[in-house]
Amino acid sequence: MSFVAAVGSEAVSRDACGGDADLEALLRGDKAAWDRFVTRHAGVIFAAVRRRLVPAGRVADAEDVVQDVFVRLCQHDFRLLRSYDAARAKITTWLTVVAHSASVDHLRRLRRRTEDIEAQPEAVLAVEPVIHEKVKIPEGLLSPRQALVLELLYQRDMTPGEAAEAIGIDPQTVRSMHHKALLKLRAHFQAELGEEGA
Amino acid sequence: MREEDGKTKEGAALWREARQGWRSPADPDLVDGSPDALLLAAYLDGGLAEDEAARLEARLAGEAALLDELLALRETLQAAPEAVPGPVMTAVLARAQAAFPERPAMRVVESARPSLLDRLFGFQLRPAVSAFAAIALLLACAGAFELGRYQAAQLDTATQTADTAESDVPAEFVLGGLL
């Protein structure tokens, strides 16, 4: 017997996530509703945890981290679970983010535990001075989305299609934003060069 | 760099120059320095308002770690369903279901659970208990009334005896004198 962890958000409909009524019953302290919630969503949480732990070689910790996610959800009278808003995001997406965050915290804790601070060279422990770069573009020259498009295309070497998927917009919009952002930057730097030359 | 995607070396140089000065604005949605789970989930589902999305995207453009996180989440959400071995999932479910917090109110209910005898006969005895209490109250009232009546009668008798004795004294004197 095997369980299928349906992580793809497209594959999971709102009904399959459990209705709001069941979630309300759970928050009122209904143990049967909690059991149903666990059965319904354990696969999604397990898959998200595994995906984060496998590259770190800690897949054996997956069960513990999944348990940590469920404990986080119900501790302090379900405080975390109460913060979920069905109007803003699907429960599977939200649980994936929570599971991902718990996995990152777990890996951080492990790293802290295994790193012997005494063994660190002085240079590593030194707090690096924060160097404030001279602002080279005026605020508002690029919109945050234009900056993100450029970051994904040039720093992450993504195609417009991949960048579009990452942002959740149309590839044609990415191309258009890329084009407009470059026009703005070109004009800005040419003007700056002109001022310096004058 | 793949120039066939419309990217140019000039574009790369321009962004390299500009990104040094890219500053993400202060974000009121931050929880301990990172966006909360609902904000990220809403962004991934396309459920953020325009201004919220812009604030998050400003940070994504300037913070490599946050962008890494978002890309990893996208990848996870788009991944094909994964089969989890049955015994592993059974163990996970059992542990998770046991994590349910026991509430104080539920413990009170638990401790007040009726005994076997009560559960078997309690529902039959409950009306009898009320009837018994009512009869006991009635009897107590009747008893008190009777006691009151008895005491009043005793008092009357005593008074009458005293009256008779009082009226008899001169007669006794008279009779005594005569006798």
Image: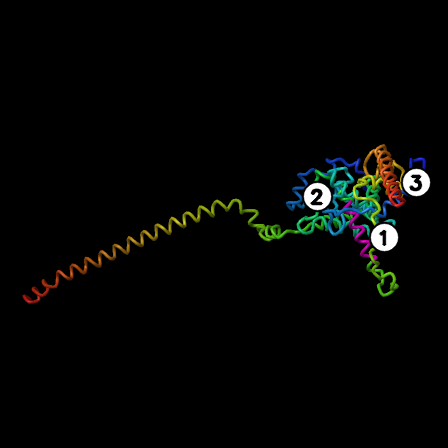
Residue A103 is covered by the magenta coloring:
yes
Marks 3 and 2 close (CB-CB < 8 Å): no
Q: Is residue B63 above or below residue B78?
A: below
Rendering coords of residue B10 (x, y %)? 92, 40
- The first of marks 1 and 2 along the sequence is 1
Residue assigned mark 2: A84
Q: Which residues are magenta?
A: A97-111
In the rendered image, is residue A193 in sight? Answer: yes
Name the residue that disc number 1 marks. A58
Residue B11 is left or right of residue A10, and the answer is right
Residue A43 visible at all? no
Q: Which type of secondary structure does the marked residue at label 2 adopt?
A: loop
The residue singled out by tag 3 in the image is B10
Which chain letter matches label 2?
Answer: A
How far apart, in angstroms, are the residues tagged by discs 1 and 3?
A: 42 Å
Identify the chain of the residue marked 1, using the numbered disc in the image: A
Which residue is most to the left? B178
- In percent of width and height, residue B45 lies at 77, 38
Residue A198 or B11: which is nearer the viewer?
Answer: A198
- Image position, residue A26 (x, y; %): 67, 44
Q: Amino acid at mark 1?
A: Arg
Residue B69: give its label.
none
Q: Is residue B25 left or right of residue A115?
A: left
